Amino acid sequence: MGAQEFSSFLDGQDRSTCVLFGDAAGAVVQGRSPDPARGIPGCNRGAEGAETDVLGIPGGGSLHPPSLHAVEHRQHFITMKGRKVFKSAVRVMAGAAREILEQHRLAADEIACVIPHQANRRIIETLADELAIPLERFVIHLDRYGNTSAASIPLALDEGRRGGRLRTGGICLLRAFGAGLTYGSALIRW
């Protein structure tokens, strides 16, 4: 399940962030399959805590508790260093995806469908190139919904299912990236 409500954390004066993020929610309900070959063979996740200033909300936590100073310095809004986010997103998501494919001895051509985090089309295209998986195998809805952040993977899974892109026995690769430079990948054998 993923839900994100950005509208209360967006700074309308910061065009580098306020036009990028949207509010959304999505959930996936999974059940046990009678076929032992189907399910979630694996997942991985990680964080690069040293990069917290690249994407996040500096104020409101224990380091910068709510105060007049935090409000005056606009610390309660999302901040982002776009170029660093792009480079970091590509690096960590490609690395996490390669790692999970290697762990499960899967080649790129065995992946039937990729459900990527829907942050940026250029990130998705670069990841497709990095992993040698054709862009046609990616479910992309960024052009219709924008960056729905935590909800993007559940929304794209639903869209892929409704569009017939997720087929029984097919392997789907999910990839995510978020604030604080968190990331992860998962495999689903549909």
Image (cartoon, grey):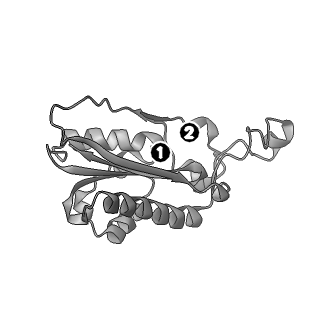
- Above or below: residue 162 compared with residue 54: above
Compute the Cα span from label 2 to label 1. Answer: 9 Å
Q: Which residue lies furthest to the right in this view?
A: 69
On-image quarter of the N terminus = top left
> Can see residue 82?
yes
| Residue drawn at the location 53% of the way across and 35% of the way down | 5
Counting other residues with Cα less than 10 Å from the Cα at mark 1, is it few (<14), some (14-19), or many (20 or more)?
Answer: many
As helix, strand or loop, the secondary structure at mark 2 comes to loop
- Foreground pick, 151 / 63: 63
Is the C terminus in the top left, top right, bottom left or bottom right quadrant? Answer: top left
Q: Position of residue 53 (x, y in %)?
A: 68, 56
Does label 2 or label 1 sit earlier along the sequence? 2
Pointer 2 local density, CA inside 10 Å: few below 14, some 14–19, many at least 20: some
Residue 43: where, in percent of width, then height? 38, 48
Amino acid type for the residue under numbered disc 2? Phe
- Discs 2/1, front: 1
- Please provide percent x and percent y for residue 167: 15, 45
Q: Camera-side residue: 121 or 85? A: 85
Q: Give the structural element (helix, strand or loop) at label 1.
A: helix
Q: Residue 169, which numbered label?
A: none
Residue occupying image coordinates x 33% and y 67%: 131
- Please tell me the numbered disc located at residue 149: 1
Residue 117 visible? The answer is no
Q: Would residue 190 be found to the left or right of residue 5 on screen? A: left
Mark identifier at residue 6: 2
Q: CB of mark 2 within 8 Å of CB of mark 1? A: yes
Image point (27%, 38%), residue name: 158
Would you identify the image quadrant in which residue 123 lies? bottom left
Q: What residue type is labelled 1?
A: Ser
